[in-house]
Amino acid sequence: MLGRMRNVTMPGGRRRAVWYAAFAVYAAGVALFSGPGLDHWWGAFAAGGYAAAAVIAAAAAGRAGPWQARGSALAVVAALAGALAAPVMWLMTREPTTPDVAVVARSGMLLLHHGTPYLPAGALAAGGWLAYNPYLPVMALLGLPGALGLPGKTWPWLIAVTIAALYATFRVTLVGARRRDALGHAAFWLACPIMAFPLTMGITDPPVIALTCLALALLARGGRMAPGRARGRDTALAALVLGVACAMKYTAWPALAVIAVMVATRDGTRSAIRFTAGVLATAVALVVALAPAALRHPATILQNTVAYPLGLTSAKSPAQSPLPGHLLATLGPAGHLAALVLLAVAGLATVESLVIAPPATPEAAARRIAIGLSALFLLSPATRFGYFIYPIALYAWAVLASRARARAAASGSPDLAGALVEDGERAVEPV
């Protein structure tokens, strides 16, 4: 692996070492304060990997030429080994597995044998919170390899989809950059706690985030083009990618609303209608194709994917971080109702902001999605701190894309090729 990574342009300079050191402090905090659960073990593995990466990056920062590139590659390999590879390999050998992995693995088995990833209503009533599957049917595809007897449960496929989507995102965002620059960014993002931690736990959000960022990147590239086939092609591809994300998890749906407004503002109402229709058609087609048996029992789908996450079922989600929505819900029926009302008010406020000041670029749309999702996660009755990886990642992509756009404008070129050659490694510094 190191041989392939040797020529990868990584986020550059001493700033690299500072980032890894900050990650090491965070991981050490997780290890010390998260209790005796699996989170503790991730923190212990990751703190060592990040600390080693920080030392390697700091040592390489003072060198020039190929030595710095090799040091950069070795640092990200150390981070990935400690924060992702080692803890995932350890967790894959443990029983029982993490709850998210268990749910996705079961959904793949159900999809293979029964044509639906959801248990029937009777099994939900008797099975407790682990019987519920809050994900949409495409997520069950990550459980199919295990159902077919392939090793690794859901982890290898979850990681593979995430890294592929991240690589594609940076290939599109950094127009004119070399493939190794995109690979370097993807590797660095995969090693960051916002991706490595949830992937280690088998949590399903990273691929949804990566696909959403890829859709935004495609729209940003399309916006740099004059109206024509190429621009329309990127918009259609973005609709397809976002449709896949929307067929995986409901957390992608707020992005559809915001992005549709952005497309209408930038390209006109007809383009927005075509884009929205493309997203919905993709999502519906995937659901119909993958879970035909589930469509005969729509109440079961709603109970799993809507009622359960909103805390409206007898079994309650363990996603209960002490955020305002959850704290209100613990006060009883009146508090739970108040949390839902506040959630609705936050949604209406987001809609109002889209009417009054609609975003005109994908970067502005990403920031607006981040704000809306932050409100959603703060006020949801069943929520956890980990959901905030969505706004963090989306905002980070927006900053990176804005810098790329500024460099392109400063270079007087419609793409980034000249700017990247001029700026060198500065063009791929972390945000």
Image (spheres, rainbow, N blue to C red):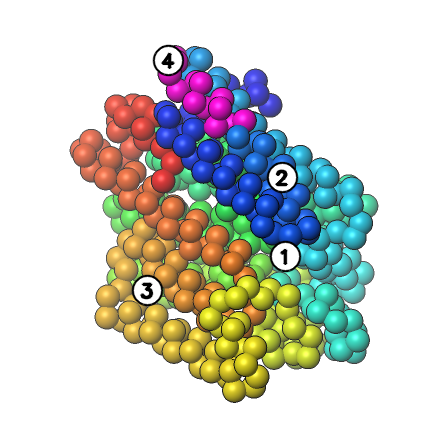
CA gap, disc 1 and disc 2: 29 Å
* Residue at image coords 62%, 73%: 308
Q: Judge depth for marks 4 and 2 and give the one in front.
A: 2
- In front: 335, or 431? 335
To which residue does mark 2 refer?
44
Q: Which residues are magenta?
A: 52-65
The image shows residue 413 at horizontal and vertical percentages of 22, 33
Mark closest to the chain's N terminus, 3 or 4: 4
Residue hosting label 1? 139
Q: Is residue 67 above or below residue 194?
A: above
Residue type, numbered disc 1:
Met
Q: Quadrant of residue 299?
A: bottom right
Mark 4 touching mark 2, by CB under 8 A?
no
Q: Residue 409 location in percent, x, y?
A: 20, 38
* Viewer can see residue 65: yes
Dot 4 or dot 1: first in sequence order is 4
Residue depth check, mark 3 versus mark 4: number of the one nearer the observer: 4
Q: CA distance from mark 3 to mark 1?
A: 27 Å
Residue type highlighted by circle 4: Ala
Cα separation between marks 4 and 1: 45 Å
Q: Left or right: where does residue 378 sit relative to residue 266? A: right
Residue found at x 68% / y 51%: 37
Residue corresponding to mark 4? 64
Distance in Å between CA atoms under marks 3 and 4:
46 Å
Q: Report, in whole angstroms, how far the alpha carbon at label 4 lies from the one at label 2.
A: 33 Å
* Residue 167 in view of the camera: no
Task: Sort mark 1 into few (<14), some (14-19) or many (20+) by Cα contacts within 10 Å.
Answer: many
Q: Which mark is residue 261?
A: 3
